[in-house]
Every structure is written in C-alpha cells, then in structure tokens.
Amino acid sequence: MEKISILLVEDVSYVEIALKDRLIDMGFEVVGVLSAPSQVESYVEKTSVDIILSDLFSKESYTGLNMAKDIKQQFGISTVILNGEDSPKISFKHNLFAHSFLSKPLKDNDLIYAIYSSQNIIDEEIESSNSYKNSKSYIFVRADYRLNKIRVNEIYYLEAKKDYVTIITTDNVYTVHATMKDMVNVLPEDLFIRTHRSYIVNIDKVFSIKYPDILIEHKMKTIPIGGLYRKALFNKINII
C-alpha cells in the first residue's frame, strides 16, 4: 500500500516539527507544513494530498473549520481538526465539515485511526498500524521550554507528582506537565508497565521484586507495587 500523504496546518513551529516526526515514524508521508488555513487551497491545487491535519485556528477570520468545508467541497479531501485545550467546544453540526476531531495532547492510536478511517481503510490495516507504538525507539517531551528527545530504552521509571510527571533516564531527569494516563498512551506497552498510581517502570530496568516493592537497577530506587496493579505486573513478567 502506498504511503498516505498528509498536509499539516499548525501555527506553532515546535508542534509542527514534533508532529511531523511522529507521523513519519508511523509510516505516513508529510508532504507539507503550512501555518494558516488560508494557505491550504492554493497548496492542494498543485500538490497531491490524501488528508489534512489542521489546528482549529479559532481566533482567525478563516478558521480550520472553514477550510475543512471548502476543501472537502472543492477537492474531496478530508480534514482532521486538532482541537487544543484552550479552543472552544465544537457543536455537533460541525461534524458535517470535518472528518473527525482530535483533542490535544494527541495520542498515537487516535491519530492512526483518524487517518486510516478517513481513507476508508479496513480495520485490519488500522490494527496492524497500531504496532507502531511498540516499535518506537524514542518519544519527545516538552520540558524547560523545549522539546526533548528521549530514547525509551534509557528511561528507568516515571513518577507522578500532582499535575506533573517526572521521567528518570540514564543521565537526566525531565519534569513534564502530563498525567500518567498520557504517558501510558505514548510509551511502548511491551516495555513499560504501571505498578502504582504514581509510578510506571521500564521492565528492562527492574533489578529485583519483593512484594510490595520493586528495586530499579543502577538507580537503586525502591518503587511500590499497588494492589490494583500487582496482577498485571506478575502476568507481564517471565517467572521461572
């Protein structure tokens, strides 16, 4: 199957770069990145595009929804609207204009499903693409006013602290504004497991387990095992 060609319309440069890299890693082709919905029509007249991923641009006179409607009517190209937390809620009638709406922060599986379903690709293709999550070698996190690339095999564990998550790696500690659920959604599930409401661990970094504690190698950090997570943990590890 040929790669699906995607046009990004985002107004924040570091978001564009991170999302573009994620889409390429998923196996899609990003043919262009624009900074405003008003630029889309002239672009698709000259370039083949399968789907558009666009910010809502709610403060612009010509919004992402306006663009989605016009491009669908003129070119038959579907648009997925990326709706930020600070954007207004979208009424049901707007579903006539866009293929679907995704809330930020964007989750990999939601992105994959929205893109493939817009192309009427069968469910088996979507499921096979979900294996991307387990093949990722790195993630990007926003910390210290920049996007930081972290290799997943260098992450030892993650700890929740109120509205933030601390990521402990081989050489660094990153504090990001996120929830544990957000982190579970982006980390490879074959490598990471939640052991407590406040902790996610890299199974490869576990030194020993003596319930109700896990000892993390090198860091010699003791992490608790919550009762709700015990069964899933012991089902996941290989015990002889």
Image: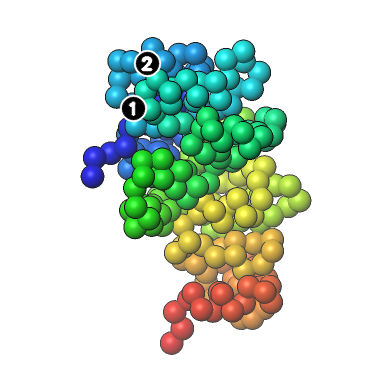
Q: Position of residue 98 (x, y in %)?
A: 51, 32
Q: Are marks 2 and 1 in contact (CB under 8 Å)?
A: yes
Residue at image position (63%, 73%) is 229
| Residue where numbered disc 1 is placed | 49
Q: Position of residue 175 (x, y in %)?
A: 65, 44
Q: Secondary structure at mark 2?
A: helix
Name the N-terminal-most of marks 2 and 1: 2
Q: Tell me, for residue 43, which label it has, or none.
A: 2
Q: Position of residue 59 (x, y in %)?
A: 66, 18
- Above or below: residue 125 compared with residue 85: below
Residue at image position (56%, 56%) is 184
Residue at image position (69%, 77%) is 227
> Disc count in the image?
2
Snapshot quadrant of residue 128: bottom left
Nearer to the camera, 117 or 133: 117
- Above or below: residue 232 compared with residue 151: below
Snapshot quadrant of residue 45: top left
